[in-house]
Image: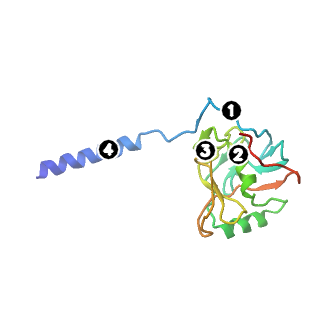
Amino acid sequence: SVMKSMRRAAALAAAVLATALLPVAAQVCRTDIPESASAWSVNGQVATNTATGLDVARCAVGQSWSGTTCTGTPTLLTWSQALQAAASTGGGWRLPNAKELESVLDRRCVSPAVDTTIFPGATADRFWSSTPGWMIDQGDGTVVGAQAATSLYAVRLVRSGFSNASYQRVV
C-alpha cells in the first residue's frame, strides 16, 4: 500500500540521517599494555627511531606537512608505482622493508595503529613495503603478505638507519 511505502521511505531516511550524524571513528589506544618499545625524536616532517637511526617521513606520500600535522589524503599506488615514487623523491628516501615499516606501528592503538603524536594526521590505510607482496595495515596494526602488486596502498618513505639495527619487537 502507499502508506506502507511512505513509512518505509521515512524509516529509511531516518536511518540514513542517524548514520550520517554518527561521529567518525577516532583512534582507540589500550592503556593496560606497555607502550611501544620504539623511542622517537621529531624534527619537522621527519621522525627518527632513536634505537635504529631510521628516519621516517611523518606524512604519507600525497599528504602535506602544515608545520604541525599532516593534511590531505595519502595517494594510493600500486607496488611498482610506490617504488617509482620513492626513487623520484631523492635525498636518500626509499620504500621501507616490512620490518622497518612495522617499527612505525604502536600495537596498543587502532584506527590508526601508530602514535599520532609522532605521526599526526596519520590515516588507517594500508601501506606498501619494499618487501615484495608485503604491506602493513595501519588501521589494525597487522603485517600481511601475499598482496597483489596491482593493489592500491599508501606509501610512507624512510631513509638511513643504522646498518646493524635490530628490528626485533620486544614482547
| N-terminal-most mark, 1 or 2 | 1
The answer to which of marks 2 and 3 sits earlier in the sequence is: 2
Query: Residue 112 shows which numbered tag?
Result: 3
For discs 4 and 1, the disc positioned in front in the rendered view = 1
Q: Is residue 133 above or below residue 118?
A: below
Lateral position of residue 137 relative to residue 157, left or right: left
Measured Cα–Cα span from mark 2 to mark 4: 37 Å
Which residue lies under the disc numbered 2?
Answer: 66
Q: Of residues 111 and 140, which is closer to you in this image?
A: 140
**Mark 2 residue element:** loop
Disc 3 element: loop
Q: Position of residue 146 (x, y in %)?
A: 61, 64
Comparing marks 1 and 2, which lies closer to the viewer? 1
* Badge number at residue 76: none
The residue located at (68%, 70%) in the rendering is 80
The crowding category of the residue bearing disc 1, from other C-alpha atoms within 10 Å (few below 14, some 14 to 19, many at least 20), is: few
Mark 4 or mark 3, which has the lower sequence index?
4
Q: Quadrant of residue 26?
A: top right
Find disc 1 in the rendering and name its residue.
Answer: 34
Identify the amino acid type marked 1.
Pro
Which amino acid type is marked by label 3?
Pro
Disc 1, SS: loop
Which residue position is annotated with label 4? 15
Q: CA distance from mark 1 to mark 3?
A: 17 Å
Picture residue at 84% right of the left edge, 47% below the top: 52
Could you tell me if the residues under marks 4 and 1 are in contact, i.e. CB atoms within 8 Å? no
